[in-house]
Amino acid sequence: MRKRAVVQVRRPGMFRWAVVMGAVLVAVGACALPGSGDGLVGERLTEFPAIDRSVLTPAQVAVVAAAETEFADPGSGADYSEGTDEPWCANFVSWVLREAGMPLANPNSGSWRIPGVYTLQEYYESRGRFVAFDPGYRPTTGDVILYGPGSRYGQHTNIVLVAEGATVTTIGGNEGDIVRIERWEPASVPDIDIVGYGRL
């Protein structure tokens, strides 16, 4: 990406294109860039966590099952994006919720796929299911975390699998260009920039 930027400075037409594309990514809410290893905030899990599903609602069980399936056999970013090559964290969230039988509805297109973090937040707000960040709010299984552009991830989103005390375990797509599960403590990460939560 940086090498292209140098070339684009030498070609004004290409530079303008890069500026426009950068604005588009900000507008749709780009998540962690493909290939980025940055933004990891806790313990990376290599196996799907043991989750007591007997204490979950049927909707939560469906989200956990869909997430487990994707973790066991993950697709590429384009697989979650209907073949489109773009940042795919919100597409991954959209995919898991659709596979769980709770498809989203893109407010712009009506599609099950919401590719932008901003648009994902608008979706939850329009349905009265958005909770602005509050240190006292305790997310639950199936909640969607929405991060602002100032976070270590960049603008990003992922799904809560487990929340126990101050610790959350999340699954997300496009985290280092893969599907990743992490166990971490939001309060111990000062630059995580959580904007809020989309409630299941």
Image (cartoon, helix red, strand yellow):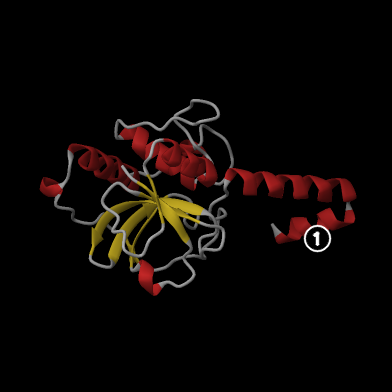
Whole-percent x and y of residue 161?
28, 52
Q: Is residue 29 left or right of residue 94?
A: right
Which residue does the image show at 82% across and 47% down from the upper left?
16
Q: Secondary structure at mark 1?
A: helix
Let me know if residue 75 appears in the view.
no
Whole-percent x and y of residue 167?
28, 66
Let me know if residue 64 appears in the view.
yes
Q: Residue furthest top?
A: 110
Q: Is residue 196 left or right of residue 66?
A: right
Which residue does the image show at 20% across and 42% down from the upper left?
61
| The one of 52 and 186 positioned closer to us in this rendering | 186
Residue 157 vertical position relative to residue 164 in the rendered view, above or below: above
Residue count near mark 1 (Cα–Cα under 10 Å), binned few <14, some 14–19, many ≥20: few
**Which quadrant of the structure image shows residue 65?**
top left
Whole-percent x and y of residue 110?
49, 25
| The one of 49 and 137 positioned closer to us in this rendering | 137
Which residue does the image show at 26% across and 52% down from the upper left?
140
Q: Residue furthest left?
A: 54
Looking at the picture, which amino acid does disc 1 mark?
Val
Which residue does the image show at 37% across and 67% down from the upper left?
186
The residue singled out by tag 1 in the image is: 6
| The one of 123 and 162 positioned closer to us in this rendering | 123
**Which quadrant of the structure image shows residue 36?**
bottom right
Residue 44 vertical position relative to residue 174 in the rendered view, above or below: below
Residue 42 vertical position relative to residue 34 in the rendered view, above or below: below
Q: How many marks?
A: 1
Of the 4 image quadrants, the one containing the N terminus is bottom right
**Which quadrant of the structure image shows residue 74?**
top left
Of the 4 image quadrants, the one containing the C terminus is top left
Residue 56 vertical position relative to residue 49 in the rendered view, above or below: above
